[in-house]
């Protein structure tokens, strides 16, 4: 009798846990302006049969943000993500209401997930950087960029529409108009005229 009761309780707990969803690995199927759709890649086993889960639609992605600053990366169909399942229904919060009761009493439901993008299977896993920071690919930036430290560029070129040098500018070679060196004249702080030809000071008067 006790053993049968134990088995019944264990079976009930197992059934309950089967519907307590936490984190799901999924593949993104489409990308909208502010949400993504995805389908879980690990099937559910029901009575010994493997069943593919349905597509999750309009899942908000996780964007790293603090104040008005944030880091947003492009998301593409075919990318993998982790769907983080909320404990309670967050529909009211998502609509703009804080500190209110959930609209539905569901818990740990697939309807209440956030997509954390950037996970990959072993074959396409990104190598962990060995240095302090490594960034690969094209980037776009809008706004001011404040930097303390050095910038080292090994290849390519830097294109500036306008540049102000506030202290010292050092260079090994300068080209202007496709020609080496800089030619022209300018007045120094003590009133002298300095003439430069092809990057070489030729006269001070």
Image (spheres, helix red, strand yellow):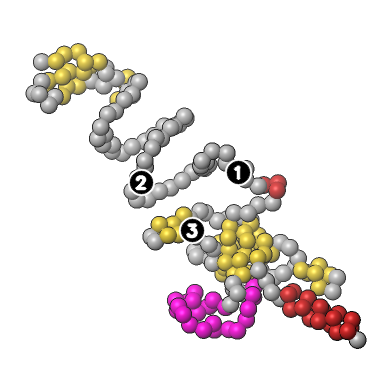
Q: Label 2: which residue? A: 145
Verify whether residue 171 appears in magenta.
no
**Spot occupied by residue 21 in the image (x, y as percentages of width and height):** 67, 71
Verify whether residue 100 appears in magenta.
yes
Q: Which residue lies furthest to the left in this view?
A: 191
Above/below status of 104 relative to 144: below
Q: Which residue is drawn at 50% across and 79% down?
A: 92
Q: Residue furthest bottom?
A: 1
Q: Which of the marked residues, 1 or 3, is nearer the chain's N terminus?
A: 3
Above/below status of 131 relative to 61: above
**Spot occupied by residue 74 in the image (x, y as percentages of width and height):** 52, 54
Magenta part of the protein: which range?
Answer: 89-110
Mark carried by residue 98: none
Q: Label 3: which residue? A: 64
Q: Residue at x 47, y 29 (%)?
A: 154
- Mark 2: few/some/many CA within 10 Å (<14, 14-19, 20+): few
> SS class of the residue under badge 1?
loop
Instruction: Please state which of residues 65 and 9 is positioned toward the viewer in this rendering.
Output: 9
Q: Residue furthest front?
A: 2
Please identify, in this view, whether the residue under mark 2 or under mark 1 is nearer the observer. Answer: 1
Q: Quadrant of the C terminus?
A: top left
> SS class of the residue under badge 3?
strand
Cα–Cα span, label 3 and label 2: 18 Å
**Spot occupied by residue 58 in the image (x, y as percentages of width and height):** 56, 69
**Spot occupied by residue 62 in the image (x, y as percentages of width and height):** 53, 62
Q: Label 1: which residue? A: 128
- Confirm whether residue 175 shows in the render: no
Q: In which quarter of the image is the N terminus?
A: bottom right
- Mark 3: few/some/many CA within 10 Å (<14, 14-19, 20+): few
> SS class of the residue under badge 2?
loop
Q: Within the image, what quadrant is residue 53 found in? A: bottom right
Instruction: Please state which of residues 160 and 1 is positioned toward the viewer in this rendering.
Output: 1
């Amino acid at each position: 009798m006790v053993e049968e009761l134990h088995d019944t309780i264990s079976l009930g707990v197992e059934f309950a846990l089967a519907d307590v969803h936490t984190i799901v690995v999924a593949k993104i199927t489409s990308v909208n302006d502010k949400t993504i759709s995805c389908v879980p890649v690990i099937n559910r086993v029901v009575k010994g049969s493997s069943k593919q889960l349905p597509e999750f639609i309009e899942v908000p992605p996780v964007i790293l943000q603090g104040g008005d600053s944030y880091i947003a990366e492009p998301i593409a169909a075919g990318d993998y993500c982790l769907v983080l399942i909320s404990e309670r229904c967050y529909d009211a919060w998502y609509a703009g209401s804080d500190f209110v009761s959930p609209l539905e009493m569901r818990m740990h439901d697939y309807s209440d997930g956030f997509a954390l993008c950037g996970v990959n299977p072993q074959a396409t896993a990104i190598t962990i950087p060995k240095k302090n920071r490594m960034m690969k690919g094209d980037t776009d930036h809008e706004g001011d960029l404040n930097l303390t430290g050095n910038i080292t560029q090994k290849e390519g070129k830097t294109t500036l529409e306008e540049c102000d040098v506030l202290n010292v500018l050092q260079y090994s070679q300068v080209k202007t108009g496709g020609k080496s060196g800089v030619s022209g004249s300018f007045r120094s702080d003590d009133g002298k005229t300095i003439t430069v030809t092809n990057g070489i000071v030729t006269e001070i008067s």
